[in-house]
Amino acid sequence: MGVPRLTGIALAGVAVYRLAAELRRARTRAHGARVHTDRDHQVSEVLVDALQDGLVIFAPDGTIARVNTKMCELTGFSEKELLGCSPPLPYWPAESEAELRAAIEETARVGRGEYDVVLCRKNGERFPAIVTVGVTPGRDARVVMIKDVADRAAMIAQTHAAHAAFAHSAEVIGEYLYSGERRPDEGFVMHAHGPGLAALLGAPAETQQLVDDYDAFVHADDRPEFDVAWRFADLLQRDGEVVEQAYRLVGVDGVARWVRDRAAIRVVDGRVLLTGAVRDISAQRHAEDERADAVRRLEWLSSVDALTELFNRRHFSEVLRARLAGSAAGAAIALVDVDHFKRINDTQGHQIGDVVLREIARRLKDATRPCDVTSRWGGEEFCVLLDEIGDDAELETLAERLRASVAASPIPVGGDVAVEVTISIGAVRPSAECHTPEQLLASADAALYAAKRGGRNQARIADGAPLLVPVDASEGLEGVVQALAAAASVRGGIGPMHAAQVAALSTAVALELDLPTATVELARLGGWLHDCGKVTVPTDILAHRGPLDDKSRDRVRHHAIAGEALVSVVPGLSGAAQIVRSHHERFDGTGYPDGLAGEQIPLAARIVAAADAFVAMTESRPYEGPRAHLDAIAELQSSAGGQFDPRVVDALVAVLDHERRDDRARAS
């Protein structure tokens, strides 16, 4: 089994302890004559010099009171040179002094310690050592054993032996030490053991009965593994090895305690001798269990949105990519955005907004099937991975079910107050030209924006590849573009979907004008990035209510120049820098920052200006609600030739007319 043990070196350690205790008692006889018999002196000398490691005993005042011959051999210093020394000691190299002082302080605090350090010999040679330190029971003497471990091949066995010897000498090891023989009949004959078994078994005192009945205290669930680990036939084949096992002991007090039993195996003439130690590791196991629970909790939290308890964007992206890795057949995604959510936050407060988001999450989850995966995509957006979808008609039916589940009834937010909430949805199925996660999400985005422009509270099914093609997915530029837009949104109090809607509408207008692909891409990038320079405008100016003074107005207008500077330094985006700079120029030449007019203004910038104005007029704003689409169109048309390029306005109106006709056809 794994019970106590005492080797020859351990017995030497016991003698060392006796010597330390005797020295302590001698010192307490202050002012009296120091009396040692010849026999005491001889025994002490034999025991001390029998040790194979350096031994240093410190007096209560911190000075060296005794060293053995091995210590002098290790360091090259004579006994005379070492006795009476106090820190820093002669064998302390300068580079280790701080570490060694810290070890002394720790030992004084906890009563023992073992440290890997570098010491030096008298000739300056450094050598690695294991220093084992302990304090005698009265804490009036410190015992240090030093093992030179330069020869790593022999280090492991010697280190364990030195540790056991020191443990006995200081009686502060905190383990139940034993030495005995495992018998062929699986019995165990104890040769010697130390104290500590009563503490392991919750007993009031150490008794021989506890030692004799040790195996009977092993927990019933752990007994089969215990019997296998300490089986005589197996141990017989493992001479020189170490056997270690963790198991539970059920004490006389009924408490189950985890212990670690570790023993060195020595086979002599067919006899299996064990020398080992049993340590209570209940606190360690409890800490490990808590850590494991914390890791599991963190893993769960890393995949779940804390507010809604739906999967978060990161985890959903992993699930989506895994689903599309094989056959994408039957899959579809639905991107969901809460209509006018900013208005809810502004009028009801963010706490009510959180209540609304949690309830929307619940309704969406209830409206999906077991094979679907619902996630919070970010802010007021959700994304659903739908499975087992046969065609667009089935996808439209499921998307409509999601929309209706949210709009079915107002959401209670406390007391008698309830909030009317609707959602817009863009959905897409994989196709030959649209099958990667990035393409599907971009296509769903485009359909979602179309649903928003079409009046909200509706679902749109994307047709084919998305208009919003990433700049260069391999370089991650699309992420940079959207990150800059998000930063401007957060800093400037702009709606989180404003830049995306401007980008989508600008792209559609550029396509309506049948412009080259490069110009279409510039219009799209300009739509995403037009306000990114607002990150340089002070927050107090952006949040100011009412008219701005001239200085503040100039600071706001500078955002066009700042945005150009930001975009121009991003490799792959510099072509859009001029569009960002010029999107506040007016067709009649009265805009800023350069006062350009007509064809002097880049065409993509003229498109972004009109799209930005329309989106701003039709989205919820802090100081007034959204304007009707027809009113916004009328405003654009009245400003054609002045603020806006008439040709761009006509194309924008045509795009919106196409969408309305598609809506009517879909409804019919």
Image (cartoon, grey):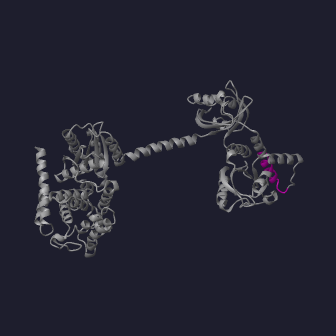
Placement of the C terminus among the 4 image quadrants: top left
- Using the image, determine if residue 655 lies above or below residue 272: below
Q: Is residue 19 magenta?
A: yes
Q: Position of residue 196 (x, y in %)?
A: 68, 38
Q: Is residue 244 left or right of residue 603?
A: right
Q: What residue range appears in magenta?
A: 17-31
- Occupied quadrant, residue 97: bottom right
| In the foreground, 519 or 294 | 519
**In the rendered picture of this protein, how many numbered marks are placed on residues?**
0
The reply to whether residue 414 is in sight is no
Image coordinates of residue 222 in percent, x first then y, are: 57, 30
Q: Is residue 352 left or right of residue 131?
A: left
- Residue 203 lies, in percent from the top left, at 65, 35
Nearest the viewer among 579 and 226 is: 579
Q: Residue furthest bottom?
A: 550
Residue 562 in view here? yes
Q: Which residue is farthest right?
A: 38
